[in-house]
Amino acid sequence: DAKTTQPPSMDCAEGRAANLPCNHSTISGNEYVYWYRQIHSQGPQYIIHGLKNNETNEMASLIITEDRKSSTLILPHATLRDTAVYYCIAPRTGANNLFFGTGTRLTVIP
Amino acid sequence: GAGVSQTPSNKVTEKGKYVELRCDPISGHTALYWYRQSLGQGPEFLIYFQGTGAADDSGLPNDRFFAVRPEGSVSTLKIQRTERGDSAVYLCASSPLPRGGSTEAFFGQGTRLTVV
């Protein structure tokens, strides 16, 4: 997997946008970037993934830089239920598993 | 439809005992994964099944750990001679396509194993 680097923790005010950065400078041209999150005492939950273009779904937006060396997950209107650990993953093409690392602990503050 | 189901949700066992952890994947998902998560860490890969066969067991820590998926659906993770260091949350995930495709994995709630 391409090595990913995330800040260990972030805070965000409720109702504001949460922007979670991830560096993946060693990513290769055909490796996707995946984001998962894990709410306390639950299994990881898929959020979104992308290759080159920005992506948006009902949960979040993913902005990938043109050189693909970094990306940002955006939760447009954070709620208290978005408090979780967020993992950025760039699995090697054809790899059989996801390397989670330690992620970013996002705390949404009322 | 139902998600990935793992049973039991909690298991306490004595050191040296044998345990089995069960995973029911989402119906029709051909790929199944086991992960282990220790407190404060991200999930760590153990083994991956494509259908009935273990396509990648490189994450199993030693030969006390074994997993099967005899009919390509339900999987059982088996741990022999449990040690206190085996205490963790064991997570199962399934996905509809092999990992080489761009698809997401769906995780269960996990089994919390405590070895006393």
Image (cartoon, coloured by chain):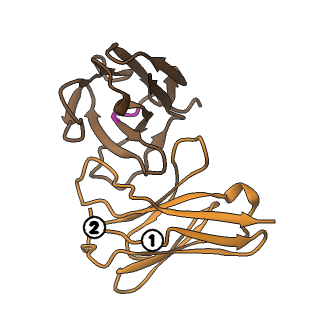
Horizontally, residue B99 falls left or right of residue A62, namely left
Decide: marks 2, 1 in contact (CB < 8 A)?
Answer: no
To which chain does the residue with label 1 belong?
A
Residue that numbered label 2 is attached to: A2
- Given residues A48 and A86, the one toward you in this image is A86
Which stretch is magenta?
B29-33
Q: Is residue A76 visible?
A: no
Q: Nearer the viewer, mark 2 or mark 1?
A: 1
- Given residues B24 and B84, the one toward you in this image is B84
Magenta region includes residue B88: no
To which chain does the residue with label 2 belong?
A
Is residue B44 positioned above or below B109 on the image? below
Residue at horizontal 55 percent and vertical 57 percent from the top: A85
Residue that numbered label 1 is attached to: A6
Give the residue type that dot 1 points to: Gln
Horizontally, residue A4 falls left or right of residue B62, namely right
Residue at horizontal 35 percent and vertical 80 percent from the top: A68
**Quadrant of the drawing holding the C terminus of chain A:** bottom right
Residue at the top extreme of this rendering: B17
Q: Main secondary structure of the magenta part?
A: strand
Give the residue type that dot 2 points to: Ala
SS state under label 1: loop
Judging by colour alone, the chain drawn in orange in this rendered image is: A
Q: Are marks 2 and 1 on the same chain?
A: yes
